[in-house]
Each structure stands twice: as structure tokens, then as C-alpha cells.
Image (tube, rainbow, N blue to C red):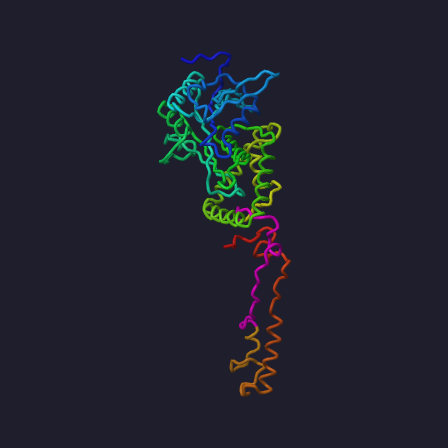
Amino acid sequence: MIELEGVPELVDPVMVAAFEGWNDAGDAASSAVGHLHREWKGEVFAALDAEDYYDFQVNRPQVWLDGGVRKITWPTTRLSVVRTSGERPRDLVLVRGIEPSMRWRSFCNELLGFAHELGVEMVVVLGALLGDTPHTRPVPVTGVTSDADLARTMDLEESRYEGPTGIVGILQEACTHAGVPAVSLWAAVPHYVSQPPNPKATLALLNRLEDLLDLRVPLGELAEDARAWQVGVDQLAAEDSEVAEYVQSLEEARDTAELPEASGEAIAREFERYLRRRDGQPGAPGGTAAEGQLGAETGGPGPYLRDPGSGRTRPRGRGRGSAEPEEAHEPEKPDDTEDGDENRDESGDHAGRDPGAEPGSESESESRSEDAAAEEGTRKPPPSPGAAGSEEDGGGDERGDGGTRP
């Protein structure tokens, strides 16, 4: 039996865990738990015995100096507790460590022992994987559970995955068998920029955690870090034409896949969620994860803007008449039925033409000249290349390329 000393009675506790290694692309998941620990000033109350679960040739200990005295930090998993702010404060039990090298079942049972002693109501495990997703779009975050009832009540996906798994999958299944509600949140990280850190993916995980637990997360400098990260990747991609073309192909595939989901109901639901976070209570310094995510995706200084008509994002300055030449407008042809009724004689021919004239005669030449002048008067000049789109198009500066690129 686990005996805990110095841990007060917790209020509606939820365990939030993340592990470095195979399930932590870009260090997004472990950085999210680390952010919660720093912002809410977590206090470590337990650490697992590293000797039981880690291969020190794979995860080596670190040597450091403390006032001239050499000390060793062993790789392990630590547990801390934080209390969230807001009208309904609750406690989070944070679990941050490294994916163990051995004895995974014993590892999970030990964590579940802590959860039982602390009265944990639910376990949320964060993870990040590499995917075919562009860095210019919002980071996809998927919520998964093995509990069908929990999937329905919390708008999650029921797990159907088959294949190799990591400690995130093992811990979630251990919780399910122990009768503890468990959810895993997965962020997709662009595989072409997999190097850590990835603050944009970390921000997306915190944003989804806010929704799941109905709490507000202080950001600190995370939102600004996410914007700076995207600007940096934009610049690197612009320097390599092949990478830029590949990113564009990912954008088009993503936009096509998400187009059916961009319904009025979905947009209204997201906007209500944003308002609920903003108006619920005064946010902590630095804003909340929801506000930071909104700024990183739509209001940041990066070179991508959101098209208000289609919900898609586009590069800055790519409106009609700017970076791309404007499509030529075909001149309108004169309507024979408008002027024709007035200019036709009783025989049905135009009033200015001699029906008996031979082709090429002087009378027919004069008639053709008059018709050409009339046609030129009714023809509208095409818009200049620098002009905004027509009223029907909605204006070139807002529509950009309008989604017409192949």
C-alpha cells in the first residue's frame, strides 16, 4: 500500500500524464505537462524508483554541480500536484517522466496505486505523433478512449487502433481494466519539422485539455513562442521550393478534407466555446490557451491569413491583382434582344441594312460599321489588373485566390 505524506486532501482530482520518447513528437506532450507544473507552481510529492523501470544505457543519468558538489539526477517519472484557478478550482495530479524501458505493467500498476490513494476521478494521457499535416494550419488534436459511454458523453472517438503501441496506450488500457475513466489526447506534428520543441502543438493540447476539463490555463509566453515558431518554419520553407510545394500540397489536401466540416453549426459551436472561456472569468496574466490558440492561428504576425468566406487560410498579399495575375474577364456580348426589337423593320431585318444589298456593297459596309459601333458602345471594359474583385466576387483583398488553385 502506498503511503503519502504531506499531500492534502484533493478537490475533484484528475491525473494528467505525459512521457518523453516514442509518444512525444516534438516534445509537445511532455512540454504541456511541464507548462502546467510551472504556471501553477506544482509541488513534487513522489518519484518512481528509476532502478526498476529504466535502462541507463538508453536513458543516461545526468551529472551536475551544486556549489562545487557533484550530484546525479536519475531518469525517472515524478508526480506533482497543482490547484487550478477559477470559479470552480480543482486539483490536477501531474505525471511527467520518460517512457520506461521495462516492466510496463508494474509501472502502470504503480501509477494506478497513486491514483487510487489520491481519489483520482479520471486519467488524461497526452501524446504527440508525426503526421502529414501542414504547419500553417491549426494542429489537429484527437481525443480517444476505450470506454464507449465516455466517448458518447465527452464527444470523443472510441479507439479502433491496431498495431504497435507505447506507454500511452498501455496506461490507458490499464486504467480501463481497473475501472478508472481514461482519455488520451493526441496532437499531430508535421513530420518535416519534427525537431523539438513545438510550442504550437503544445498550445493545441492545452487548448483541448481546457475543453475536456472545463478549466482555464494561463499561457505565460507560450502563445508568443507558438507564433515565433510558425514564422521561423515559414521562412525555412520559403527558402526551399520543393518544401514550399510540398507544404502547399498538404494545405490543399487538408482543406479539401475539412471542407464538409466547415458548417455553420460547427463554426457557431467553436465561437460559443471561445466566448464562454473569454467571458467566464478574468484570465490569468498572459491569457488562456484558447485565446493564445486563436491568436497563433488567425491573428499572429505569420504570413497566413484566414479567408472569412471559406474558413481557409491563405498567404498575405495573395489577393487579386497582387501576387498572382488576375483572371481575365470575358467582355460581355451585346444582347440582340434589347436593341433588336427597336431596330428591326417589318421584314425582321435590322433597320439600317438594305435587304437587297449584295455582300460587299457600300450599303452593307455602312450597316456593318454602324453595328460595330453599337456593339463597341455596349461592351464593358475588363477591370484593371490592380483593381479589387467585383461586387459579385466579394472583393479581391478578402477572397485571395478563392480556392481556385489546382
Residue ID at (54%, 21%): 63
Q: Percent position (x, y) of residue 396?
A: 60, 54
Q: Percent position (x, y) of residue 363?
A: 59, 86
Left or right? Give the position of 387 relative to 175: right
Count the marks: how many?
Answer: 0
Residue ID at (59%, 81%): 367
The magenta stretch is: 310-338
Q: Is residue 378 magenta?
A: no
- Using the image as rendered, state which of residue 343 and residue 305 is in the foreground: 305
Left or right? Give the position of 52 relative to 280: left
- Using the image as rendered, state which of residue 258 and residue 274 is in the foreground: 258
Q: Quadrant of the N terminus?
A: top left
Q: Percent position (x, y) of residue 398?
A: 59, 50
- Using the image as rendered, state which of residue 143 and residue 133 is in the foreground: 133
Residue ID at (53%, 29%): 31
Name above or below for residue 313 compared with residue 72: below
- Using the image as rendered, state which of residue 16 and residue 20 is in the foreground: 20
Left or right? Give the position of 336 relative to 151: right
Kindly report the secondary structure that dominates the magenta region of the rendered protein.
Answer: loop
Name above or below for residue 31 compared with residue 376: above
Q: Is residue 323 magenta?
A: yes
